[in-house]
Image (cartoon, grey):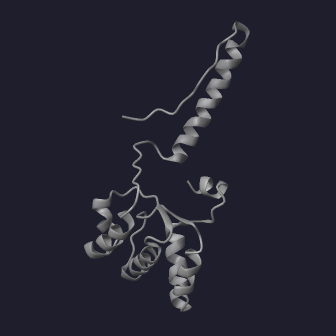
Amino acid sequence: MGRAAITAGKKVRFFQADQLIEALYRGLAENTVGKLIEHLLRHDLVVIDDLGFTALDRVAADHLFRFISAAYEQRSVAITTNVEFERWTQFLPDAASATAILDRFLHHCHVIALDEPSWGCWRLLALETRRKLCLSIMELGSRGAGAIRVRRRRRR
């Protein structure tokens, strides 16, 4: 999604969730959180990857809320997570924080739920599949094999 936005001429900023939280903490220490958020809002899309991988304390959750609120109906924010919305209280300090963030984030949003292996697992699988495919093509080459199409299948 980020690459497509860049290709379309949009300004995009990508963060691992822990990097964003660290930047917000640094801004808190330097009294520049407001400037950091203003800078982030100059981008057309901010991507936050792996939110929920580590638990957030009250201060981190408050600053994440502050950013999401500032972006609300102003800029696009994409969040990737392995945590279902109902379980956001597992990495946020309480239900009130989870509700406040989700309220602003989910309003006007498109949820894309993937029931597939992670991209990293898929790349490794694809590499092995490509190796096997190349061997198969070399074996079939002298017999005039037709077109071979490999596509990603959903796991059930």
The image shows residue 144 at horizontal and vertical percentages of 70, 9
The image quarter containing residue 115 is: top left
Q: Residue at position x 63%, y 65% from top?
A: 11
Query: In the rendered image, which quarter contains the C terminus?
Result: top left
In the image, what residue occupies the spot 51% across and 69% down?
75
Q: Considering only vertical position in the picture, is 137 above or below 124?
A: above
Asked if residue 27 lies left or right of residue 93, the reply is right
Instruction: Answer with left or right where residue 15 lies relative to residue 92.
Output: right
Q: 92 or 111, which is in the foreground?
A: 111
- Going by the picture, which residue comes out furthest to the right? 142
Q: Residue visible at 46% across and 58% down?
A: 80
Closer-to-camera residue (129/73): 73
Report the number of discs.
Answer: 0
Residue 86: x percent and y percent?
Answer: 27, 60
Q: Position of residue 66 (x, y in %)?
A: 43, 80
Among the 4 quarters of the image, the one containing residue 137: top right
Q: Which image quarter: residue 106?
A: bottom left
Task: Tell which of 146 and 128 is nearer to you.
Answer: 146
In the current view of this chain or complex, which residue is farthest to the bottom?
Answer: 31
What percent of the width, then of the height, locates residue 42?
A: 59, 74
